[in-house]
Structure formats: C-alpha cells, structure tokens
Amino acid sequence: MRARCHLIILVAAMLLTGCKVSPPNRVERYVVHEVKHHITVGNKSAQNPIPLTTENLADGKEAFGHYCTVCHGLDGQGTGVPFADQMSPPLPSLASPEVQSYTDGQLKWIVENGIAPSGMPASKGTLNDDEMWSIVLFLRHLPPAGSLGEPEVYSH
C-alpha cells in the first residue's frame, strides 16, 4: 500500500512538472540551437518541384490549414493561438527572417521530419511530398500577420 502511494505521488509530480509552461532554460535553448544547426546542413540543395501558381499556392494554404494552424495560426505567425507565446521553446513566426532564411529543401525537411525537442511533429506518412512542397510554397508567401483571423478551433 505504501509503495502504491509513493508511486501515485511520483507520477503526479512528474505530470505536474511536465505540464508546466515556462521560458526555455539554458539546456533547452542549447538543444534547439544545435538541432537548427544540423537542419541547416540537411537537405539544403533540394529544390521545390512545385511551381508558383495560384492553384499550387491555394493547395499549400489548404494543407497548412489542415495540419499546421493549431500551433502556427492561419497566417503562420501564431495569430489566434492562445498558447503560442507560452511554448517552450518559443514558437517562431514562420515569416521571421530566421525561418525564411532556410532553403526550400530545409523547410521541406522540417515539415517532413519535425523537430522533436521543440514539439514540431513530423509529417512523414501523413502528408505526401506534393503536400509538403505546397506547404513550403505557402510559407514563402505568407499573408500579413492577423489578416486571416484566428483558427476556428479556438473561436468556440
């Protein structure tokens, strides 16, 4: 009985500390920096095979809307996402120079493989290559912050 009580207390403590929202600490910042450094090396030369057309841009916006807006907002800049400024590590604006400095191949790699320490999920097996490349196309042509409103999931 006593062991069971200790186990319950241990699990509760782990859940409570694992669910807290706090600014990233030095170790988290270091890990994210190192991950970003390695991403910069991977897939750098891959070119987006999807040409820029109104239809392809709409496809990218639609795929982004289905798979990315819960965290990134409709505009890719966190608009309307109630926890966007509380993420640890912080969620970058996808329109930021830091994100836009990645090549198309690197952005596709991030969409496909995710960034585990940051909470960015992998889309491999969920999205096909054309959908991932269309999302990259949309990321290159993001609308102004706030211009698309907030995701419906948060408006109810």
Image (tube, rainbow, N blue to C red):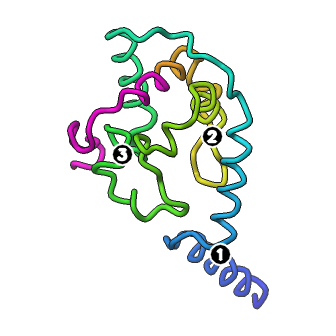
Q: State the residue at coordinates (40%, 40%).
A: 95
Place of residue 80 in the rendered image (x, y in percent of width and height, measured from the top left) = 28, 50
In this view, the residue farthest toward the bottom is: 2
Q: Amino acid at mark 1?
A: Met
The numbered disc on residue 77 is: 3
Q: State the residue at coordinates (43%, 65%).
A: 86
Residue 40 lies left or right of residue 88; in this view the side is right
Marks 1 and 2, how far apart in space?
25 Å
Q: Is residue 128 above or below residue 149?
A: above
- Magenta residue span: 135-155
Residue 80 lies left or right of residue 131; in this view the side is left
Task: From the image, tell me which residue sits under label 1.
Answer: 14
Q: Earlier in the sequence, mark 1 or mark 2?
A: 1
Q: State the residue at coordinates (36%, 23%).
A: 62
Q: Amino acid at mark 3?
A: Gln
Instruction: Out of 37 and 10, give the one closest to the viewer.
Output: 37
Q: Amino acid at mark 2?
A: Gly
Magenta span includes 142: yes
Place of residue 5 in the rendered image (x, y in percent of width and height, measured from the top left) = 70, 86
How crowded pointer 2 is (Cα within 10 Å; few <14, some 14-19, many 20+) is rated as some
Residue 32 lies left or right of residue 131; in this view the side is right
How crowded pointer 3 is (Cα within 10 Å; few <14, some 14-19, many 20+) is rated as many
The numbered disc on residue 114 is: 2
Q: Please, what is the dominant secondary structure of the magenta stretch?
A: loop
User: Mark 1 or mark 3: which is in front?
Assistant: 3
